[in-house]
Image (cartoon, rainbow, N blue to C red):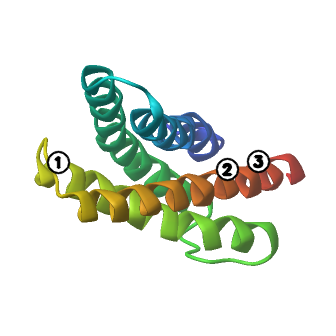
Amino acid sequence: MTIPADWWPRLHGASTHLPVALVPVAAFFDALSLIVRGPELRKKFGATSALMLPLAALGSIVSVFSGLGQSHGEWLGQGLLRSHHLFVWPAFALVVGLATWRMLAGPEPSARSLLIYRVVLWINAGLILAAGYWGGELALSR
C-alpha cells in the first residue's frame, strides 16, 4: 500500500480546523463567564471553555506533526511558511501549556492565576487565528 502524494496536506488541512476553531471559542466562552449574571451560568461557561482547551491541544499535536510532514521537516522555512510558523510555534506551546494548567488547576483556581490564564488564552486565540490566516495564504499560493 502506498501513501498518496497529497496525504500530508490533506491530513494537515483536516486537523488544523479543530484547534483553530476551539481556541477562540474557548476564549469567547471564558469571556462570557465574566459578563453573564448568575454564578451557575458563569460556572457553566467557564467549564465549557476549560473542556475545549484539552481538545484543542490534542488536535494541535496532530496538526503540528502533519504540518512538519507537509513541510518536509522545515521548522521555520521561508516566505509564507515562515510567517505561518512564526505564529504556529508560540500558539502550539501556549495551547498545550494552557490546557495542562487548566486541568491541573482544578475547578477553583485563584483569582490571580485565573487572570493570567485568561490573558494568555486571549493572546493564544490571536496567535492561532494569525497562524490560520498565514496557513490559508500558504495553501492558496500552491
Amino acid at circle 3: Gly
| Element on which disc 2 rests | helix
**79 above or below 117?**
below
Instruction: Assess whether mark 2 and mark 3 are in contact (beta carbons under 8 angstroms).
Output: yes
Secondary structure found at label 3? helix
Q: How many residues crowd around disc 3 within 10 Å: few (fewer than 14), some, or many (20 or more)?
A: some
Q: Position of residue 41 (x, y in %)?
A: 32, 21
Q: Determine if residue 69 is in view.
A: no
Q: Residue at x 59, y 37 (%)?
A: 4
* Residue under the image location 75 percent in, 51 percent down: 133
Q: Is residue 34 left or right of residue 82?
A: left
- Residue positioned 55% across, 75% down in the render: 75
Between residue 36 and residue 8, name the one nearer to us: 36
Picture quarter with the N terminus: top left
Q: Nearer the viewer, mark 3 or mark 1?
A: 1
Q: Which residue is mark 2?
A: 132
- Callout in the foreground (1, 2): 1
Find disc 3 in the rendering and name its residue. Answer: 136
- Assess disc 2: are there few (<14), some (14-19) or many (≥20) residues with their C-alpha within 10 Å of its C-alpha: many
> In this rendering, is residue 38 above or below 56?
above
> x, y (%) of residue 14?
57, 33
Q: How far is disc 3 from disc 2 in space, using C-alphas?
A: 6 Å
Instruction: Kindly identify the amino acid type of the residue bearing the numbered disc 1.
Output: Met
- The residue carrying mark 1 is 103
Q: CA distance from mark 1 to mark 2?
A: 25 Å
Amino acid type of disc 2? Gly
Q: Nearer the viewer, residue 69 or 131?
A: 131
Q: Secondary structure at mark 1?
A: helix
Q: Is residue 107 left or right of residue 38?
A: left
Q: What residue appears at the point 73 percent right and 70 percent down from the top-left corner?
A: 83
Above or below, comparing residue 126 to residue 89 in the picture: above
